[in-house]
Amino acid sequence: CKIDYQAAPNILENRVILVTGAGDGIGRAAALHYARHGATVILLGRTIAKLESVYDEIENQGGPQPAIFPLNLEGATLKDFHDMAETLDKEFGRLDGILHNAGILGRITPFEQYNPELWEQVMQVNINGPIWMTQALLPLLQASKDASVIFTSSGVGRKGRAYWGAYAVSKFATEGFMEVLADELENQANIRINSLNPGATRTQMRRSAFPGEDVATLRTPDEIMPTYLWLMGPDSQGTNGEKIDAQPAR
Ligand code: NDP
């Protein structure tokens, strides 16, 4: 956990960074902070109006001009990911980081009542989509001098919890895939692969998981950004295959 980390102002200068689920919650904060520290941010998500509002805010804060990449991970195919790689290569000629942040909760419900279609949907958005996106973008990442790939985990991706169903399983799979890929790329010093657990954070998703909670007790997305900046930027060089926490346990 690097909650006290202070990123140098231009630490992400000249980097092109893709943020998925950039329209809301933690992804929105990460896109704004990455841009504020010099990155050209590619804003990927499914609700274009939200991406446009992040785009405008980056322009207003004087950051490098971002780009919007509308994509719904639920229906995305291998071809979509390869087209995406081609577009990024053509438009930017490089990619120096991915924050795999988009995710859905599915339903918190006893397993006997879990709807199999919803289960598939959660696995698609939270892990299968990110896996095939990563495969398609790997050549671009490999060409970078210093690339960081961050997968978003959760406390229930490390210790299962009753009723959390597909969400928990998708986060276990996220940790597992992160370890496999990090180990495969162990000898490529220019790419690091890690997972990041934001911890309880004040967003819409947290609100649907814990409707009765006093949100004032939760850290905001902005407050957990030091770890997001550290792991995306050069100060985390040499960290590979690690499960990182964005905030101390509550
Ligand atoms: P939010 O629900 O606030 O934001 C999730 C973002 O992902 C939204 O922008 C959403 O788009 C996007 N998204 C969802 N489904 C898709 C899809 N099919 N295709 C493209 N984009 C999609 O969640 P958080 O910010 O809270 O969560 C961010 C990440 O952090 C998730 O991976 C979550 O599992 C993880 N996490 C969060 C915790 C917390 O306490 N908040 C704790 C532990 C982990 P749209 O706006 O269009 O819905």
Image (spheres, rainbow, N blue to C red):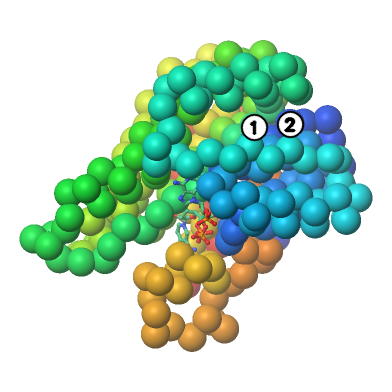
Q: Disc 1 marks which amino acid?
A: Gly
Label 1 vs 2, first from the N-terminus: 2
Q: Is the residue at mark 2 in contact range of ligand 1, meaning its CB lies under 8 Å from it?
A: no
Q: Residue 189: horizontal and vertical position, in percent?
A: 61, 19
In this rendering, would 85 be left or right of 66?
A: left
Mark 1–mark 2 distance (CA, rounded to whole Å):
7 Å
111 w.r.t. 46: above or below: below
Instruction: Give whichever of 30, 188 is nearer the camera.
Output: 30
180 w.r.t. 115: above or below: above
Instruction: Give whichever of 215, 69 is nearer the camera.
Output: 69
Q: Residue at x 68, y 17 (%)?
A: 89
Q: Residue 74: horizontal and vertical position, in percent?
A: 39, 41
Which of the numbered marks, if any, corresponds to residue 97?
Answer: 1
In this rendering, would 193 be left or right of 212?
A: right
Q: Residue at x 72, y 17 (%)?
A: 90
Q: Disc 2 marks which amino acid?
A: Val
* Residue bearing the label numbered 2: 16
Q: Residue at x 67, y 13 (%)?
A: 143
Q: Secondary structure at mark 2?
A: strand
Q: Residue 125: horizontal and vertical position, in percent?
A: 39, 43
Q: Is residue 18 visible?
A: yes
Q: Residue at x 25, y 52 (%)?
A: 118
Q: Are marks 1 and 2 in contact (CB under 8 Å)?
A: yes
Q: Is residue 189 visible?
A: no
